[in-house]
Image (spheres, helix red, strand yellow):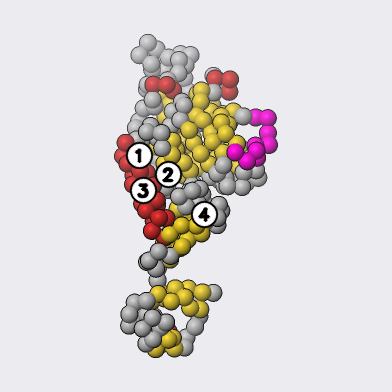
Amino acid sequence: MKTYKSCPKCGAVLKVDSDYVGRINCSKCHAISDASEFKSVPSITVMCPKCNTRLVSYNIGGNVGVKCRNCSYVGSLAEFKAYTDSCNANSAALNNNNPVVDDAPESTRLNIPGAGSRGKTEVNIPSGYTSPLALLLLEDNDNKWDGAERCVALKRGRTIVGRRGGKADIELPTQDMFMGRAHFVVDVSYNAASATFRHTLSDNSSVNGTLYKAKNGEWIKLDNMTVVVIKDGDLIKVGHTVLKVTRGSENTTF
C-alpha cells in the first residue's frame, strides 16, 4: 500500500510503500534518510464539486489532481478544498439561521378534535401518530424508484430514512445506489400546549451526505452536526433522488 511522506531535509512529498523501513533517496534534494525520519502527510476529507461525494485525499500541496470515485470528475486538490470549505461555511450559516425551536412553523398547525379556542388540547397523541407532513418523490434521475408509492407518510419520533433493503424505519421504494440504507433522520415532535408539530432534518453519517435546499435556492450539504427545521415545500436531495416535504393529508389520520 502506497502512502505520502515528506522529506525531513527539504519537505518534498514522496509516494512510498507504507511498510518500507529502509533508506529513501529524495527525488528532489537527493538527500538519503531513513524511512523512519520521513513524516506521514495527513489525509483530508474533501467533497466533489460536481456530485458532492466525500473523498479522502492527501494534503500534499501544489496543483495535485483528485479524481472522484463516483462521477470520475478530475480537478485540483485546491478546487476540491475550496468547494468543501464553501459547503461547510454554508452549512454553518444555515444551522445558525435555522435554529431548532420548540414550536413548529404555522404551516404544520392542526385543528385537532378537542382543541380549545387557544389551540390547547387534551388529546393524547400516541407515539405512532402520523404527522401532517410527508415525503413526496419529486425527481428520480436514474429511474430507480421501483414502487407505485410516491408519497411516504412521516410519524412522530425519530425516524431513520433510507433505500429499500436495509434496517431503516422508513425504507423508500428505490434502488438508488447513491442513497444509503440509513441515509438521513427526520425527527417529529408534538407540542400539546400549542397543538403544533416540529419537523427537523439531519444527516445520518451517510457516505454521500444529505442536501437541503436553502431559502436562497442553493443546495446545502448537511454535516453530522447540522439540524434544520423543515416545512411544507422544502426539498431534500439524497443520492440521485429529490424528495419534497409536502402536506400528507391523504396519509394523515386522527
Label 1 CA crowd tier, 10 Å (few <14, some 14–19, many 20+)? many
Residue with the mark numbered 4: 73
The residue stretch that appears in magenta:
141-149
Mark 4 secondary-structure assignment: loop
Mark 4 or mark 3: name the one nearer the start of the chain: 4
Residue type highlighted by circle 3: Ser
Percent coordinates x, y for residue 56 in the rendering: 47, 61
Q: Residue at x 38, y 17 (%)?
A: 120
Percent coordinates x, y for residue 249 in the rendering: 54, 20
Task: Compute the Cα span from label 4 to label 3.
Answer: 18 Å
Percent coordinates x, y for residue 60 in the rendering: 39, 68
Mark 3 secondary-structure assignment: helix
Image quadrant in which you'd find residue 141: top right
Q: Which mark is nearer the camera, 4 or 2? A: 4
Residue with the mark numbered 1: 94
Mark 1 secondary-structure assignment: helix
Task: Compute the Cα span from label 2 to label 1.
Answer: 9 Å
Residue with the mark numbered 2: 222
Q: Is residue 178 above or below residue 105?
A: below
Mark 3 or mark 1: name the one nearer the start of the chain: 3
Residue with the mark numbered 3: 86
Task: Compute the Cα span from label 3 to label 1.
Answer: 12 Å
Mark 2 or mark 3: name the one nearer the start of the chain: 3
For the residue pair 178 and 6, the one nearer the viewer reads as 6
